[in-house]
Image (cartoon, helix red, strand yellow):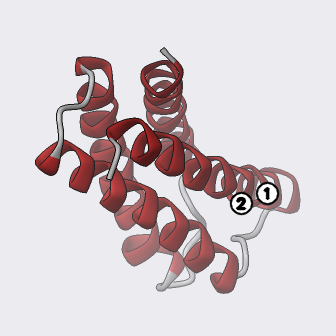
Amino acid sequence: MEPNLMLQSATGLFVVAALGGLLMAAIRMFGKRNPPPWLALAHGLLAGAGLTLLVFAALTTSIPQMALFALLLFLAAAAGGVVMNLGYQWKQRPLPVPLMVGHALLAIVAFVLLLGASIG
């Protein structure tokens, strides 16, 4: 498979995951409650699919250095997502806002890097 097509497909998956992330952040920030579990699951599955595709591209083809750095940041963001899911969401404890913001900031920077790598 063509490396650029894989990067663009991963970018598309991350766009949809980000929309779910924005909705979850709004629910948590303005509703003062955690988002519904189905939304968190969909967000994680879409982001995980994008991450898996990005890892596959990195292991099987030559992708730009910027995409490799994006991969590292997405992995860090995914770790934060796992902590929020297992440590808070499933225990029905409120998601910590600083962790949520850190997760989002890592993912945004990674997304911008991936977008730059997939376009240029």
Image point (47%, 49%), residue name: 10
Query: How many numbered circles does the render carry?
Result: 2
Give the image location of residue 36, x and y in percent.
72, 80
Q: Nearer the viewer, residue 71 or 85?
A: 71
In the image, residue 90 sits, relative to residue 114, either above or below, namely: below
Circle 2 crowding by C-alpha within 10 Å: few under 14, some 14–19, many from 20: many
Image point (18%, 32%), residue name: 62
In the image, residue 114 sits, relative to residue 77, either above or below, namely: above
Q: Left of 72 or right of it: where is 38?
A: right
Circle 1 crowding by C-alpha within 10 Å: few under 14, some 14–19, many from 20: some
**The quadrant where residue 85 appears:** bottom left
Give the image location of residue 71, x and y in percent.
29, 39
Image point (48%, 38%), residue name: 107
Distance from disc 2 to disc 1, alpha carbons, whole Å, reads 5 Å
Which residue is labeled 2 in the image?
20
In the image, residue 15 sits, relative to residue 87, either above or below, namely: above
Give the image location of residue 69, x and y in percent.
26, 26
Give the image location of residue 46, x and y in percent.
54, 66
Q: Residue furthest right?
A: 30
Q: Left of 81 or right of it: where is 1?
A: left
Residue at disc 2, secondary structure:
helix
Disc 2 to disc 1: CB gap under 8 Å: yes
Amino acid bearing label 2: Gly
Amino acid bearing label 1: Leu
Disc number placed over residue 109 in the picture, else none:
none
Q: Nearer the viewer, residue 75 or 56?
A: 56
Image point (43%, 66%), residue name: 49
Which residue is labeled 1 in the image?
23
In the image, residue 1 sits, relative to residue 70, either above or below, namely: below
Q: Residue furthest top?
A: 120
